[in-house]
């Protein structure tokens, strides 16, 4: 029994909700072994206060079952993430805020096709369920700014023209989430030609003229990419934080990092990175990393932020989107859905921690 056998055993302890272990995440700061008494020091940054206790009990369980271990002492050193929303509404120019909305978060990606809208939709549904469990139902909104390919209405199962009352557009509601998309206002068959400046002014106008009030949290699905349209959007709607979506491969990491720097320029704090399409898991639990491994963690490291979660490739995710019932509603117990709930709790804790 020595430090290296303990470290080896610790590399079987996964970070809650992740496919990676706590050693490769760099959380194990020290291991001391003295006559069968083991002391492990873990240094961890998280906003989710369930994570430290879950890691601690997995370590105790794993090490406790080793031959020759008489006692296990886990020293958890936990700090809150930096870079999260400084003071929420207090920290931002008041005129840029959407009236009646407490927190606004952007979901962004460097390029299309990485699952940004899928994640925005599932995250919004997960956030709504988490808030509803705390007695605050219908307090989440989802604004689809992806005007080039508005897929949110389809994924959320809403259609029909929104009504207007008192000069405000009434969002459509499904699964407790208030949904608004330009896709609901323009004719599917009529081609819409948008140019950069038009996009941002149209969306900003539009976002303000929706009856969101009262919302705890508005999730904004940004158009993919990092051009002028995105930049002026994040400048004209005050955002409390941004979540970057990437896939695991190196090329995507570079694009995501470049995209995320845009938020730095306009002082929008990064809440973290979500890696999508991380792996495919078969019925026996064996994982295939089709697009490589570690892209999300690398992006997070490069941007000095956190990896919020890894979402597996799952045909049910796509089917849910196509059917207009997101997996977080249709199959809330599924492994993919559980990832979304964990991320939702993390985001709420981060925003709430800065109240
Ligand atoms: P983006 O908004 O980045 O362009 P979408 O959310 O539209 O991407 O996703 C692109 C396609 O990939 C959609 O058909 C979607 O259902 C599918 N998809 C996204 N994430 C996953 C996943 N984790 N597993 C399976 N299919 C996915």
Image (spheres, rainbow, N blue to C red):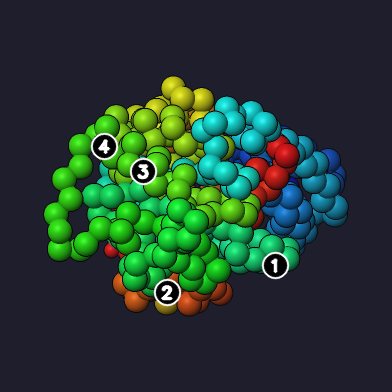
Figure quadrant of residue 44? top right
Residue receiving disc 3: 203
Identify which residue is drawn at 36% across, 48% down. 145
Tag 3–tag 2 contact (CB < 8 Å): no
Could you tell which of marks 2 and 4 lies nearer the N-terminus? 4
Label 1 to label 3: alpha-carbon separation: 32 Å
* Mark 1, residue position: 133
Q: Earlier in the sequence, mark 1 or mark 3?
A: 1
Q: Among all residues in the image, which is located at the extreme front? A: 166
Kindly identify the residue that appears in the image at 70 percent across and 45 percent down: 352
Q: Quadrant of residue 140?
A: bottom right
Real-space Cα separation, disc 3 to disc 4, in angstroms: 8 Å
Comparing 345 with 206, the one in front is: 206
Q: Secondary structure at mark 2?
A: loop
Residue 283 against residue 202 in the figure, above or below: below
Q: Hey, which quadrant is residue 320 in on the image? A: bottom left
Graded by Cα atoms within 10 Å as few (under 14), some (14 to 19) or many (20 or more), the crowding at tag 3 reads many
Q: Does residue 347 appear left or right of residue 299 in this picture?
A: right
- Residue at mark 4: 198
CA–CA distance in space, label 2 to label 4: 32 Å
Please name the residue that numbered disc 2 is placed on.
325
């Amino acid at each position: 029994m020595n430090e290296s056998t303990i470290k080896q055993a610790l590399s079987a302890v996964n970070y809650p909700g992740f496919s990676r272990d706590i050693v490769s995440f760099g959380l194990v700061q020290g291991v001391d072994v003295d006559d069968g008494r083991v002391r492990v020091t873990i240094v961890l940054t998280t906003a989710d206060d369930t994570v430290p206790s879950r890691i601690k009990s997995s370590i105790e369980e794993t090490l406790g079952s080793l031959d020759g271990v008489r006692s296990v002492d886990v020293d958890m050193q936990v700090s809150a993430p930096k870079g999260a929303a400084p003071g929420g509404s207090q920290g931002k120019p008041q005129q840029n805020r959407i009236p009646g909305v407490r927190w606004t978060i952007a979901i962004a990606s460097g390029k299309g096709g990485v699952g940004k809208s899928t994640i925005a939709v599932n995250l919004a549904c997960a956030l709504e369920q988490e808030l509803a469990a705390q007695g605050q139902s219908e307090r989440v909104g989802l604004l689809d700014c992806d005007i080039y390919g508005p897929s949110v209405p389809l994924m959320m199962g809403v259609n029909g023209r929104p009504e207007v009352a008192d000069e405000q557009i009434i969002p459509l509601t499904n699964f407790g989430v208030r949904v608004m998309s330009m896709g609901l206002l323009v004719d599917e068959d009529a081609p819409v030609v948008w140019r950069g400046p038009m996009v941002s002014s149209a969306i900003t106008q539009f976002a303000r003229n929706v009856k969101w009030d009262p919302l705890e949290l508005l999730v904004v699905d940004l158009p993919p990419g990092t051009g002028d349209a995105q930049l002026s959007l994040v400048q004209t709607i005050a955002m409390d934080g941004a979540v970057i979506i990437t896939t695991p491969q190196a090329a995507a990491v570079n694009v995501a990092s470049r995209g995320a720097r845009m938020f730095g320029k306009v002082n929008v704090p990064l809440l973290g990175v979500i890696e999508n399409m991380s792996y495919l898991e078969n019925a026996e639990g064996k994982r295939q990393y089709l697009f490589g491994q570690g892209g999300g963690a690398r992006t997070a490291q490069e941007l000095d932020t956190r990896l919020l979660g890894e979402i597996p490739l799952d045909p049910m995710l796509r089917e849910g989107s196509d059917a207009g019932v997101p997996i977080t509603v249709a199959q809330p117990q599924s492994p993919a859905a559980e990832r979304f709930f964990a991320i939702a709790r993390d985001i709420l804790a981060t925003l709430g921690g800065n109240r």
